[in-house]
Amino acid sequence: MTKGFTQDLSASFVVFLIALPLSMGIAIASGVEPALGLVTAIIGGLVVGAFGGAPLQISGPSAGLTVLVLQMHSEHGMEKLGAIVIVAGLVQLAAGLLRIGRQFQAVSPAVIRGMLSGIGVLIIASQFHVMVDDSIHETGLENLIRIPEGIWKAATDYQDRTHDIAALVGIATLVAMVAWDRFKPRVLKVIPGPLVGAALAAGIAAVFAMPVRYVAVPENLIEIMSFPGWHTLRYMAEPDILTAGLGLAFVASAETLLCATAVSRTHDRGKTNYDRELAVHGIANLLCGLVGVLPLTGVISRSTANVEADALTRRSAVMHAIWIAGFVLIIPNVLGLVPTSSLAAILVYIGFKLLNIKAIRSLARFGKPVLGIFLATAVSIVAIDLLKGIVIGLLLSAMRLMYMMSHVEYWMEKVSEDRIDMHMRGSATFLGLPKLAETIDSVPQGKEVHFHFDELEFIDHACLDAISEFRTRYEANGGKVVVEWEELFSLQTKSLGDEVAVVEGITLTGEPSPEDEDEAAQED
């Protein structure tokens, strides 16, 4: 018991060191006060940590939501953002209670990877401008296009402002993080790179009294919260707020459950209950909306650190929230020493990690259509907005699935004067029956016809029935039909498990039907 508590306590401190700078940076990137990100992290630790369905997952403000939250905050304001988060929380709670948590995993990896990469590009584009003490522009595409302008301002001491100094602080943070992640001593491996970068930047800025923007942390957290009133219910009934809430719920749920899946593969310290995790995240986001702070999701960086720090139970998640609360309440002034450009640099670093070039290369191995869906999703998110980009990706993914389920190729190969091989590729369903009928009806009479199924992804009862009817007619006219049993059995067991299917004379058991056994005996 004592050993387990000690391990959880140690792991919680490691997670706290990661969550502290990231929560503030994500809040700034979302267009709100840094302290609101800390409150979200506290709620995530206390609520999701104590009651969630993924024992070692850490929840809090997520870089994956920054683009969406910034857009919603800009369009609707902080008060309506609270209503949007409440709607999202209610949707997540309902989804968890209805036990559809697993269904969020039924999304094409190309869409998910495109979403994360698009978000990564937008984070880099927006936080680069913050890193050089410049203003964020209205759209993600404009932020991306105007990066050269930001570089020019930082390099030329533009209008006697502090762009160059802020840029140096940001670059120092980036260099420190990259160097620490690559060369950190084994005995100090628990100290995260973002903390090292932020601490170095704070030290440099303090020693040289640099005239840059610093993190503003209020003495009283309650003062910056916006609690709901009766007008919040009115906001929640507005169509645009409902739509935004549904979109936020989808993105937050997908990120949370993907994170839960990834984390569950790294340990054997408790099973993951996806429905419970989703429902509890709904409750936590409902609370976040009620107190007017950022929404939360499961966060992979903090969760992975929790596992690697040998956490044993959900206590580590709860205790990391207590560390944050204690730090904010006891020594909040320390946070005010951190330059804003340093936190922006941390977000730029995270944006590059979200791009994940290795994962993109692995997608490319699955073919051009998958890569095309990924690119379309990512580009749409950057060029239009996050929700529309996701919808475009989902539509393209659905169209590809429909094509795959309806597309099939049939062709004949003349092996000899007396033998013809019939090949199939794709998914043979009832939608392709006209093409199948046309092909087999064109087979010359009196031949030996072999049906091959090794290149098929799927074949349904309708197509098997058509082949069976053809076999009966063809053999009645003096021909012979040979079904490649092993290929067909392999295909059907892949689709049907251990079930045995019988389709008018074709028995899918890996063995020929009685009629075929008689034919084989005659041949012998």
Image (spheres, rainbow, N blue to C red):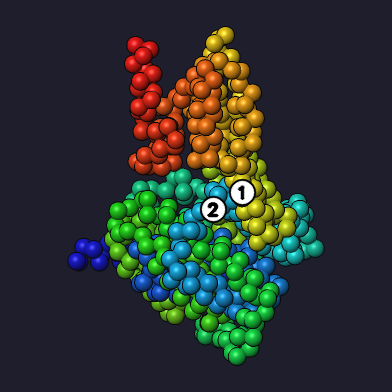
Q: Quadrant of residue 474?
A: top right
Q: Name the residue tied to disc 2.
A: 107
Give the structural element (helix, strand or loop) at label 1.
helix
Give x and y (percent) for residue 363: 56, 40
Q: Which residue is pictured at 60% across the width and 37% down the height?
A: 433
How packed is label 2: few (under 14 Cα within 10 Å), some, or many (20 or more)?
Answer: some
Q: In this view, which residue lies farthest toward the front?
A: 476
Q: Outermost residue toward the left? A: 1
- The 10 Å Cα crowd at callout 1, few under 14, some 14 to 19, many 20 or more, is many
Q: Position of residue 177 (x, y in %)?
A: 51, 52
Q: Amino acid at mark 2?
A: Val
Q: Nearer the viewer, residue 118 or 375?
A: 375
The answer to the question of whether label 1 and label 2 lie on touching residues, with beta carbons closer than 8 A, is: yes
Instruction: Please state which of residues 208 and 177 is positioned toward the viewer in this rendering.
Output: 177
Q: Nearer the viewer, residue 274 or 342?
A: 274
Residue linked to disc 1:
397
Residue 83's x, y, as percent? 60, 79
Q: Is residue 83 above or below residue 202?
A: below
Quadrant of the snapshot with the C terminus? top left
